[in-house]
Image (cartoon, helix red, strand yellow):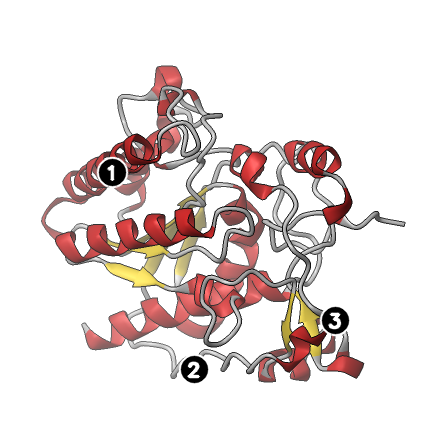
Amino acid sequence: MRKPWFVSVVLAAALLGACTDPSSGPEAGPAPAASPGASATTQQPAPVVSAPPVTPPTVLYLGDSLAMENQEVLGEELRERLRAGYTGAPHSGTTVCDYLEGSAERSLVPASDKAAALVRTLRPDYVVLQFWGNSWGYTPCMDGITYDGSRERYLERYAADTRRLTDQIRSAGGKRGPRIVWVLQGPDPVTPDRVRRVNALYERTAAGSGDLVADAGRAVSPAGARYTWTQYLPCDSYERAHPDHCTEPGRDRTALHLDDDPLHFCLAPTTSEPRPCPVPSPGIRRIAREITRVIGEDVRAG
């Protein structure tokens, strides 16, 4: 039987470290469990996606372990709802600087998978970027800068990296370069203010470059409590129609996280080898549907 994740800081850190994603390091430690009444939280509405656009978009998806576990479900949603061409190329344990060209010597991403290199090869219409924020300095490209060690320095460096990545993607795409979709993250159970500030940084970056934001984190947050972490949410209409996505139908609520992993949304135990999530997981589907909705609306508006 899986032990409750809140009983031991050491156990939680060890289990999260095994998933090979440094973004699930110390900040993914124990957090307060959701109250038994979490199922009474106001229900999140399911995203509404209209008919497929006349010209299907092409989408490139990059990111860390959250993107790694999401990638197949996002591809399904994009193909089904938008008839999109889709490529997923996430790498667990990464952050924004790993995808910058010129960082191959100190990066977890090979040169061939840098964002600009993939844009030049694939010529996507959209580049979706999903990063938790790698706040504890695992990847070498962060030069040891951590949120706990120096919050302002961490945020300044992270902002500079998001601007550089935007510029590199723009340059690689030429005159008709792709639009970037910055995915906002769900609540951080240990340092909620960090996610607020990282999400605000993504929003400023998108506004400054005319790009998009997908607030997927809201889809995995209680209604009216955007930065309050919870393990469970009421089942939405999609989950009620697909019983394997409503994990506790008798209580009309569904699990977003395993007991021993408050960060990831895959309801299968993490493994030492990163992989797409192999089981139905409501949090992943909610995130994918919101990203798809934002892209679909932009395609139709264009």
The reply, left or right, for residue 284 in relation to residue 153 is right
Contact check, label 3 and label 2, Cβ < 8 Å: no
Residue furthest to the right in view is 1
Q: Residue at x 62, y 37 (%)?
A: 274
Residue at image position (38%, 17%) is 106
- Find numbered disc 1 in the image and state the secondary structure of the residue it sits on: helix
**Which residue in the protein does label 1 denote?**
165
What is the distance, in whole Å, between disc 2 and disc 1 at their CAs?
31 Å
Q: In the image, what residue occupies the spot 46% across and 61% down?
A: 227
Front in this rendered view, residue 39 or 19 = 39
Residue 166 lies, in percent from the top left, at 21, 43
Horizontal placement of 111 versus 201: left or right?
right
60 or 264: nearer the viewer: 264
Where's the C terminus, which quadrant? bottom left
**Mark 3 or mark 1: whose residue is earlier in sequence:** 1
Q: Which mark is residue 247?
A: 3
Task: Examine the image and state in which quarter residue 149 appears.
Answer: top left
Q: Residue 221 placed where, x, y %? A: 51, 67
Residue 96 visible to the viewer: yes
Please indicate whether residue 223 sits to the left or right of residue 280 in the image. Answer: left
User: Which residue position is annotated with label 2?
Assistant: 48
Nearer to us: label 3 or label 1:
3
Classed neighbour count for the residue bearing mark 3: other residues with Cα under 10 Å, few (<14), some (14–19), many (≥20): many
Three-letter amino acid code at the position of disc 3: Thr
Q: Amino acid at mark 2?
A: Val
Are the two marked residues, 3 and 1, in contact with CB atoms closer than 8 angstroms?
no
* Three-letter code, disc 1: Leu
Q: CA distance from mark 3 to mark 1?
A: 38 Å
From the image, state whether disc 3 or disc 2 is nearer to you: 3
* Separation of residues labelled 3 and 2 (CA atoms): 22 Å
